[in-house]
């Protein structure tokens, strides 16, 4: 603000080729005037869908700069596609302005449980990071598992908690990435825990992830119900 106080507000954006946000700014908005006067800012980001929003959040800190005209045109077209449902002040307009947030550092909090802690990541490390290959369909995978394969979710949770599946009071898949899954589960004591269960190897795509989930469930089933070979009787009638 003019008094030098931070002003939090809702903002829509898309990402450039290295993951930095390109903000869509309303030309006459108060926060646009603030940024033109003082270009330092932060962008708070958290998954909007349940249950992923329970898992992580991040603040991207840096400075904003106007993008070149050609990039602004492509950013406007992409913004209309990604945020076509905007209404009122959120509705895209021809005179919108597009500014890039040059990330200096990230303030990240993951696994929002009692033992979670914040992590500060430098801007260069952020820009050099690779996006997770499951990011586009992780949400649909989580929804599918919780709706159609909930018994598998309970089974995997029971193995991780080292309890019988009948002793699991609550379990749900929270999120999935190339290295494993996050679960929330509790036993009969009612204590809800955030669990991390890694895959045997990094998965590469949606089909690979579904296969890894099936294998994880099968391993949990075999540990809960170990296979015992039935001996074959020997004798004259064999």
Image (cartoon, rainbow, N blue to C red):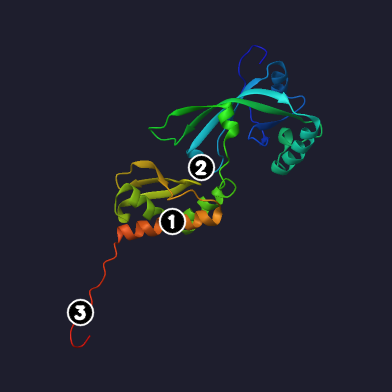
Q: Give the side of residue 236 with respect to residue 29, left or right.
A: left
- Specify which label sits upstream in the sequence, 1 or 3: 1
Circle 2 is placed at which residue position?
52
Q: Residue at x 77, y 26 (%)?
A: 27
Name the secondary structure under disc 2. helix
Choose between 83 and 181: the one closer to the eye.
181
Q: Position of residue 130 (x, y in %)?
A: 57, 39
What is the number of the mark on residue 233?
Answer: 3
Name the secondary structure under disc 3. loop
- Specify which label sits upstream in the sequence, 1 or 2: 2
Q: Residues within 10 Å of mark 1 (few under 14, many from 20)?
A: some
Q: Position of residue 118 (x, y in %)?
A: 46, 28
Circle 1 is placed at which residue position?
150
In the rendered view, tell whether residue 235 sits above or below residue 42: below
Q: CA distance from mark 2 to mark 3?
A: 54 Å
Q: CA distance from mark 1 to mark 2?
A: 17 Å
**Count of all numbered marks drawn on residues in the image:** 3
Q: Position of residue 31 (x, y in %)?
A: 69, 23
Q: Give the side of residue 212 with respect to residue 4, left or right.
A: left
Q: CA distance from mark 1 to mark 3?
A: 40 Å
The reply to whether dot 1 and dot 3 touch (C-beta < 8 Å) is no
């Amino acid at each position: 603000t003019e008094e030098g106080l931070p002003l939090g507000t809702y903002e829509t954006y898309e990402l450039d080729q290295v993951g930095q946000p390109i903000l869509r700014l309303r030309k006459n908005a108060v926060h646009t005037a603030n940024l033109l006067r003082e270009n330092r800012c932060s962008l708070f980001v958290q998954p909007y869908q349940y249950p992923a929003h329970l898992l992580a959040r991040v603040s991207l800190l840096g400075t904003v700069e106007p993008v070149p005209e050609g990039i602004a045109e492509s950013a406007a077209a992409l913004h209309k596609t990604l945020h076509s449902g905007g209404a009122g002040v959120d509705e895209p307009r021809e005179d919108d302005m597009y500014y890039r947030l040059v990330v200096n550092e990230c303030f990240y909090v993951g696994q929002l449980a009692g033992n979670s802690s914040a992590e500060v990541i430098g801007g260069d490390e952020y820009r050099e990071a690779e996006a997770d290959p499951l990011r586009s369909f992780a949400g649909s995978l989580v929804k599918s598992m919780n709706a159609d394969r909930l018994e598998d979710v309970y089974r995997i949770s029971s193995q991780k908690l080292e309890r019988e599946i009948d002793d699991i009071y609550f379990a749900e898949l929270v999120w999935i990435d190339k290295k494993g899954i996050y679960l929330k589960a509790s036993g009969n004591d009612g204590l809800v825990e955030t669990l991390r269960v890694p895959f045997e190897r990094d998965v590469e795509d949606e089909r690979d992830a579904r296969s890894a989930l099936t294998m994880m469930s099968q391993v949990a089933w075999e540990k809960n119900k170990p296979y015992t070979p039935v001996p074959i009787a020997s004798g004259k009638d064999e």
